[in-house]
């Protein structure tokens, strides 16, 4: 029959804190996790803002295209829409990559 340890909860917590604080790897992991969570939240906000803007532009373009009376006007609007869309997505990709790069750089180098 095994006997239960006489350690108290505060002893267990103190041991866990000492273990976590003493390890450079644990500190690096905590810093990397914090950077990742911050970047994830920032990316989500950025993407929601972008999608809102794109949906507004797409709706406006659709209304313009539906009001067209000839194919030449429709084609011109469609061509403009394609150019704007590609430009917007390219700019958004750059913003997201900047957020990710900033996150990686803020996490700092890891020691092996």
Image (spheres, rainbow, N blue to C red):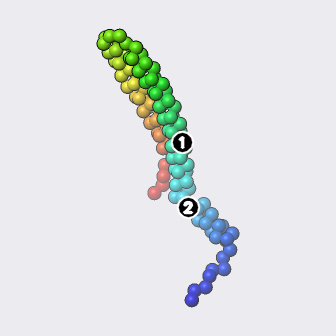
Q: Marks 2 and 1: which is nearer the front?
A: 1
Q: How crowded is mark 2: few (under 14 residues within 10 Å), some or many (20 or more)?
A: few
User: Regarding mark 1 in the picture, which secondary structure is present there?
Assistant: helix
Question: Which of marks 1 and 2 precedes in the sequence?
Answer: 2
Q: Mark 2 points at which residue?
A: 23
Q: Give the left or right position of residue 75, taking residue 14 as reference.
A: left
Q: Position of residue 91 (x, y in %)?
A: 43, 28
**Where is 17 relative to 53, above or below?**
below
Nearest the camera: 9 or 32? 9
In this view, the residue farthest toward the left is 71
Q: Where is residue 95 in the image (x, y as percent from the top left)?
A: 47, 32
Q: Position of residue 29 (x, y in %)?
A: 52, 55
Nearest the camera: 69 or 34? 69
Query: In which quadrant of the rendered view does residue 84 lie?
Result: top left
Query: In which quadrant of the rendered view does residue 89 lie?
Result: top left
User: Regarding mark 2 in the picture, which secondary structure is present there?
Assistant: loop
Q: Give the left or right position of residue 72, taking residue 109 as reference.
A: left
Q: Where is residue 10 in the image (x, y as percent from the top left)?
A: 69, 69
Can residue 25 be spotted in the picture?
Answer: yes
The N terminus is located in which quarter?
Answer: bottom right
Q: Name the residue under label 1.
A: 41
**Total marks placed:** 2
């Amino acid at each position: 029959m095994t006997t239960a340890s006489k350690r108290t909860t505060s002893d267990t917590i103190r041991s866990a804190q000492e273990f976590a604080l003493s390890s450079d790897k644990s500190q690096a992991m905590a810093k990397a996790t914090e950077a990742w969570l911050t970047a994830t939240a920032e990316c989500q906000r950025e993407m929601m803002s972008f999608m809102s803007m794109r949906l507004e532009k797409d709706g406006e373009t659709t209304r313009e295209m539906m009001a067209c009376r000839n194919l030449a006007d429709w084609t011109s609007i469609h061509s403009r829409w394609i150019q704007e869309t590609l430009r917007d997505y390219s700019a958004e990709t750059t913003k997201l990559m900047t957020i990710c790069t900033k996150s990686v750089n803020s996490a700092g180098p890891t020691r092996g």
